[in-house]
Image (spheres, rainbow, N blue to C red):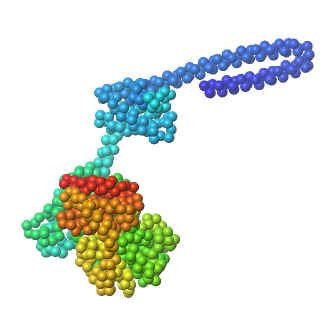
């Protein structure tokens, strides 16, 4: 209609111009011949009348044409709508069915579509509620009807009437059958290739403990077990090294292997040979990694290598599958076995020395709410940096029982008055060639300052905790030994094997020893030969053991709090103790940890968990004698650690809710073990 109006207006405009020209001509003629004036006026009047009549007739003709055109367009649209190749329905959000196409009737003839429509309308209402435009908009939903996949496309418009005080909308919905497309997508996904790496954890150790005659028998049996498992899932195995095999498997078969809980982990432990007493040597275990990340085989292999690093960093004897960026863990319930070599410590010591020498300055940082292990290992590396002539600072903002006493003692000595800095002060110290050394954690979000990780391009990680999925990936040097007792033990080895003449101060020696003592619970848990060798080195340096023990002494008030926590504990699953520290205390996390240690001294308790609240965070400390893997339990809550010692932090949650969440995860852990 607007185009028609323009045509009419254009026509009328031209007519006016012609009338003006005619009027001018008649005026000129009348001026030359005055006697022609009456005739001129009469003629012009006739022309005006004719023009007016002609315009009206033209308008009527154009209007009629536009009506016919509009009617033709509407009829075409209606015909297209009715004969749509897709099922089409017009329905109100109240459930009132206004109209449905013949295709819709045919498609859902044998389906109770009314109930399904009501469910779809609930989703549409939710879509409208979350939409910015409440008047009208588009609809795009996915649904399943009688085993078929449908995309629902359409639009909604606000109705003028209300229904029981609820706004009513009219919708037009197209149902597009995507079943075949979905099947093709699923087939493509099922046929997608995943690359895996299978490593024999203790190949070297087994080889060293058995004779040359028997070694091929065990190796052959291990490989046969792996090949048999792979054949079960139509996987291809390629041996790359003595202890490493590559596995190529389709995703649908990998899914089956996951549903079977990666039985290869248990199959390998069931190997028995008449000629060999397996109990006299180390039982073979595997570390397995699979990943589908990446478009090319090179990218997938790179991703799988990163996943196998996580498996090894978590102590081995487990399988990790990474699909669509999500990790699934299998196994990893056995205690780590010490198998470090001194060669690696020497190599790391040499590499770290070069990195420090190439740096403008060194910033040392542990985990948030630092303890004696993070501070002790930082103190050792502080001395190494100073010996190499580099400025070094330790980032620390946390205080607590034991640590507070140490920091106070350190700041009284001139050497350490400016050694410790806050996070903000550390940020101001960052230079283009600064070196950041992270100790006692490998998690990005658990460091004292995640911002520092982003600010410094060169990062070194020295840690002993089982690796988590959010570990610091781009470290230029990583000394990650899950078999070590503590970060202080690793740093002590770095110092011991350094070619520099490092003269540790008394306080630094005591800090390193205290770090080992803390994480081993006075050399009770997670101690290996290397742990005692590191302690012996520090003892040789002149550590005052009695003085160190005094740092860990609790005052009477703290001891009473711990005793109260122990007395209120409850037992679940027959041998797991759980308790809560309900007082508002800035040392709640430390008291909870000490109480968890104390609970483990009670007969019949094989694992303990204590919860405490500090600010808006709930801290959970888990301890075990080894029968129960507290690390796996607390990892489900975002925490981590070791089989016998782990922790987690929960935000914006009450103690009671956190306790219930913990119990749910414990039950989940035992359910997974049984199945």
Q: In this view, does 133 lie to the left or right of 50?
A: left
Q: In this view, does 27 lie to the left or right of 15?
A: right
Residue 210 or residue 626, whichever sits in front: 626
The vertical placement of 498 against 45, above or below, is below
Q: In this view, does 476 lie to the left or right of 633?
A: right
Tally the marks. 0
Q: Which of the 4 image quarters holds residue 67?
A: top right
Q: Which residue is drawn at 46% across and 83% down?
A: 414
Q: Which residue is drawn at 29% across and 49% down?
A: 191
Residue 310 or residue 565, whichever sits in front: 565
The vertical placement of 231 against 9, above or below, is below
Q: Where is residue 138 in the image (x, y as percent from the top left)?
A: 46, 36
The vertical placement of 595 against 387, above or below, is above
Q: Position of residue 587 (x, y in %)?
A: 37, 67
Residue 48 visible in rendering: yes
Q: Where is residue 93 in the image (x, y as percent from the top left)?
A: 42, 31
Q: Residue at x 34, y 53 (%)?
A: 324
Q: Which residue is drawn at 69% across and 17% down?
A: 56
The vertical placement of 629 against 42, above or below, is below
Name, please, the residue furthest toward the left.
274
Residue 595 visible in rendering: no
Quarter containing the N terminus: top right
Residue 302 or residue 443, whichever sits in front: 443
Q: Position of residue 249 (x, y in %)?
A: 26, 54
Q: In this view, does 270 lie to the left or right of 601?
A: left
């Amino acid at each position: 209609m607007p185009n028609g109006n323009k045509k009419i207006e254009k026509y009328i405009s031209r007519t006016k111009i012609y009338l003006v020209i005619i009027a001018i001509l008649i005026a000129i003629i009348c001026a030359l011949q005055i006697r022609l004036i009456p005739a001129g006026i009469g003629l012009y009047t006739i022309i005006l009348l004719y023009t007016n009549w002609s315009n009206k007739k033209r308008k009527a003709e154009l209007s009629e044409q536009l009506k016919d055109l509009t009617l033709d367009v509407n009829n075409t649209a209606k015909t297209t709508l009715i004969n749509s190749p897709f099922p089409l329905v017009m329905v109100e959000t109240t459930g009132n069915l206004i109209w449905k196409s013949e295709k819709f009737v045919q498609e859902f003839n044998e389906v109770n579509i009314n109930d399904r429509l009501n469910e779809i309308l609930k989703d549409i209402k939710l879509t409208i509620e979350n939409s910015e435009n409440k008047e009208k908009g588009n609809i795009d939903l996915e649904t399943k009807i009688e085993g078929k996949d449908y995309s629902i496309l359409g639009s909604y418009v606000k109705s003028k009437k209300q229904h029981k005080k609820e706004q009513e909308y009219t919708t037009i919905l197209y149902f597009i059958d995507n079943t075949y497309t979905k099947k093709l997508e699923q087939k493509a996904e099922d046929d997608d290739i995943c690359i895996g790496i299978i490593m024999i954890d203790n190949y070297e150790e087994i080889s060293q403990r058995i004779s040359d005659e028997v070694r091929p028998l065990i190796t052959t049996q291990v490989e046969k077990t792996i090949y048999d498992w792979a054949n079960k899932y139509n996987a291809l195995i390629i041996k790359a090294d003595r202890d490493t095999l590559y596995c190529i498997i389709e995703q649908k078969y990998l899914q089956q292997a996951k549903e079977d809980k990666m039985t290869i982990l248990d199959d390998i432990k069931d190997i028995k040979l008449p000629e060999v007493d397996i109990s006299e040597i180390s039982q073979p275990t595997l570390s397995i990694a699979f990943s589908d990340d990446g478009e090319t085989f090179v990218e997938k292999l790179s991703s799988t290598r990163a996943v196998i690093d996580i498996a090894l960093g978590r102590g081995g004897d487990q399988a990790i599958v990474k699909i669509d960026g999500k990790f699934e863990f299998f196994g990893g319930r056995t205690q780590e076995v010490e198998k470090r070599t001194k060669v690696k410590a020497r190599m790391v010591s040499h590499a770290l020395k070069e990195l420090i020498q190439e740096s403008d300055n060194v910033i040392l940082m542990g985990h948030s709410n630092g303890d004696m292990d993070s501070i002790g290992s930082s103190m050792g590396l502080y001395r190494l940096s100073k010996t190499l002539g580099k400025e070094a600072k330790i980032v620390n903002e946390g205080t607590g029982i034991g640590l507070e006493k140490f920091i106070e003692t350190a700041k009284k000595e001139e050497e350490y008055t400016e050694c410790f800095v806050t996070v903000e002060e550390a940020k101001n110290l960052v230079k283009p060639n600064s070196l950041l050394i992270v100790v006692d954690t490998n998690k990005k979000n658990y460091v004292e300052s995640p911002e520092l990780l982003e600010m410094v391009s060169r990062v070194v990680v020295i840690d002993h905790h089982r690796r988590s999925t959010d570990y610091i990936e781009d470290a230029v040097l990583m000394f990650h030994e899950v078999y070590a007792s503590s970060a202080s033990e690793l740093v002590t080895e770095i110092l011991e094997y350094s070619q520099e003449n490092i003269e540790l101060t008394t306080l630094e020696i005591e800090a390193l020893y205290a770090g080992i003592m803390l994480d081993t619970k006075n050399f009770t848990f997670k101690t290996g030969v290397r742990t005692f060798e590191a302690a012996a080195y520090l003892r040789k340096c002149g550590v005052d053991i009695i003085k160190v023990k005094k740092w860990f002494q609790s005052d009477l008030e703290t001891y009473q709090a711990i005793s109260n926590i122990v007395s209120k504990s409850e037992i679940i699953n027959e041998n797991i103790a759980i308790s809560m520290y309900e007082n508002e205390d800035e040392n709640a996390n430390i008291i909870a940890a000490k109480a968890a240690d104390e609970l483990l001294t009670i007969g019949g308790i094989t694992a303990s968990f204590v919860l405490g609240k500090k600010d808006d965070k709930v801290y959970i400390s888990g301890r075990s004698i080894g029968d129960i893997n507290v690390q796996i339990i607390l990892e489900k809550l975002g925490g981590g650690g070791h089989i016998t010692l782990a922790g987690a932090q929960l935000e914006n949650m009450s103690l009671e809710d956190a306790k219930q969440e913990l119990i749910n995860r414990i039950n989940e852990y035992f359910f997974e073990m049984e199945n």
